[in-house]
Amino acid sequence: MAIVESINDLPVQDPPEEDFSSADLTWTKFGTTENHDDAALIPYDRVDDFIIGEGSNLECPTRFHIERGRRRKMGIFTEYKDDEYLEYKLYWCSFGPENYGEGGGILPSRKYRLNTRNRAARPQSMRGCTCNFVVKRLYARPSLALIIYHERRHVNKSGFVCHGPLDRDAIGPGANKIPYICNEIQQQTMSMIYLGIPEENVLEKHIEGIQRYCGSNAKVNSLASQYVHKLGMIIKRSTHELDLDDQASIRMWVERNKKSIFIYQDTSEKDPFLLGIQTEWQLQQMIRFGHRSLIAADSTFGIKRLKYPLCTLLVFDSRQHALPVAWVITRSFAKPDVSKWMKALLDRARSVEPGWKINGFLIDDAAAEIDPIRDIFCCPVLFSLWRVRRSWLRNIVKKCNNIEVQREIFKRLGNIAYSIWDGSDTLVALEELTQDFVDQTAFMEYFKQSWVPKIEMWLSTMRSLPLASQEASGAIEAYHIKMKVKLFDDSHLGALQRVDWLVHKLTTELHSSYWLDRYADECDAFQNVKEEYIASTSWHRALQIPDSAVSLDDKDHLFAKVLSQKDSGTMHLVWNPGSEFSFCDCAWSMQGNLCKHVIKVNMICESRQGYKPSMSSQSFKDVLMNLLKKPMDDSIALDHSMAWTMQMLDQIRNLVEVSSANDIRMVVNNLPLQWVSKKGRTSFGKPLTNLTLPSASNDPRSTAARKKNRKRKRLSRLR
Ligand SMILES: [Zn+2]
Ligand SMILES: [Zn+2]
């Protein structure tokens, strides 16, 4: 075949099928006589169709992931070659590039024989496949994409087919007859086993999955049954303890799981231990849900019980639930170490999605270092009250016996938090509190010891940072509770001091559980998993309570009553309604949690006269009022603060119930919004949506949005 040297000689191909693959395209040798590859030119907006089609290859079904990406700005070249790119993405078959199979990585020397079955716990996942191609969005013609195929066969370095039905040594003797099990089914089966679902149910779902590829017959079913059983045994036998010594064990784990690590620093004389875990899937979720959105930290988890505390980075997924996208295990909160891992995390995301950017970072610890966040993520920092609320409530319930005393102390503490804007003296308020409840010795002792010394720091953080909504706080708390249940059940007491155990637990059980939740929701499978996942935050549970079940005390606004939905004879009393520091007498709340009754009551109070607004909307109002006081000149400072405000507004609108935004909107409408139309000054202040709040149903754009959603759904299957 002749070699084409100019891209202008390549025809643009636009196959009629919804998804298409390389077999549907005519490939041309493109380049020079010495150096050329197979190339084809397609419309840029059909790239996704190609990637889906290419992964559905019957001989080697797979997924393609972005291994590397780069992007350039329009207008940076005055002269350029006709194949110069605006966007460059290197797609790799997800069975590579690493090889975790036999002869793959080199295992470090070990003191005793390992259970070699461990390594097979992810059979077929990484087999060193070299199949890869590049998609270039053309600089000269951005509506077109050039696909350059480097290796079209799914072979490993030695040139052997390394996965799919033609793979001769899939797993064990006779394995070539084993039906192909794609990543997704394998992940699904593993997740179900990790979650303790009975083997027959796992098998049923497993067979359903593989039949999509190979039809139904007795042989396939019996092999599938063996496979599931074997995988179950492997998982049961797999252990976190790769070495008796925890440090050596972690080193080995790190060596074997390079793809799931974004930073690792072993303990040494000058550096503390630091391990950042993020699987491929988590990376994709972070890019997808974190972009132009929020990241939240559940910091200092297990600071008392674990060897090193765990910090989890969370994104809010399509249901606004908190989804863990990275885990950082370290004892160091020092600036240089925090900067190190944050930078590594950002670099990793940008290596795949060059324009990736978050709009806000939510912290929950007043002692957290803020500078690294601002320097590295270049975004506003927000504060969430969930941690302080939770520890106050838990200790009040634990240390005071009388429920009337409990709710009154909680209310008073809430008042102190609410008073940050009215300039009242915290010390005086604290003094009064101590005197009024002088007989509550156990609680007062705790409070004096743990809070009084640092309360100024916490309050000033609340005052200076915008506050996150109750929905966000509830979502983070739901994650935190799930972690506690999974990690601190009594069977692991001896293991809490081992990092390898924590890592194992996170990357197997926890990861599987979140993977399955998302999968169930996006593919509408596993109805019970899906329902449980949807109802996993108090916010969603609160939405199930009808307004009619709530009655307010209209006279003094002292309490509200919520009729139980399950048991119509039961009534829950919510003390101090309309506040983040409302106190409910239900069992869930008495454990220190933000319960659905409090959230429901607060949703109603937000639209009623006479109740004060939540702390998060007060805090936002405060930011806006400060802004109003700024000189109305053309200064950069004004531009800058406007930009942040618009961005925050966008975030808050996503998180706060739309109805509660009414009064905020009035304030916003009075602002010098004309600024926003001055295009070309700075880009980050531009709101993503227009200012009017969208109505849900009769919006003509909703059909388009739905279509887009479907597309996104399909894309998410790619990842
Ligand atoms: Zn491959
Ligand atoms: Zn409750």
Image: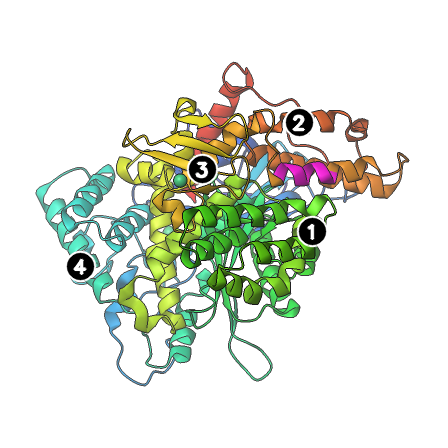
Is disc 1 surrounded by few (<14), some (14 to 19) or many (20+) residues within 10 Å?
A: some
Q: Is residue 201 above or below residue 167?
A: above
Mark 4 → mark 1, Cα distance in angstroms:
48 Å
Residue situated furthest left in the rendering:
218
* Residue denoted by label 4: 230
Q: The C terminus appears in which quarter of the rendering? A: top left
Q: How is the image coloured?
A: rainbow
Mark 3 vs ligand 2: CB under 8 Å?
yes
* Residue denoted by label 1: 378
Image label count: 4
Provide residue 212's location: percent of width, then percent of height: 24, 37
Q: Which residue is rendered at x = 47% and y = 46% of the image?
A: 407
* Residue denoted by label 2: 663
Frontmost residue, 462 versus 201: 462
Provide residue 361's location: percent of width, then percent of height: 61, 50
First in sequence, mark 2 or 4: give its number.
4
Range of residues picked out in magenta = 616-623
* Residue denoted by label 3: 574
Q: Nearer the viewer, mark 2 or mark 3?
A: 3
Residue situated furthest right in the rendering:
633
Magenta: main secondary structure: helix
Provide residue 73's location: percent of width, then percent of height: 71, 43
Residue at disc 1, secondary structure? loop
Residue 620 on the magenta span? yes
Mark 4 → mark 3, Cα distance in angstroms:
52 Å
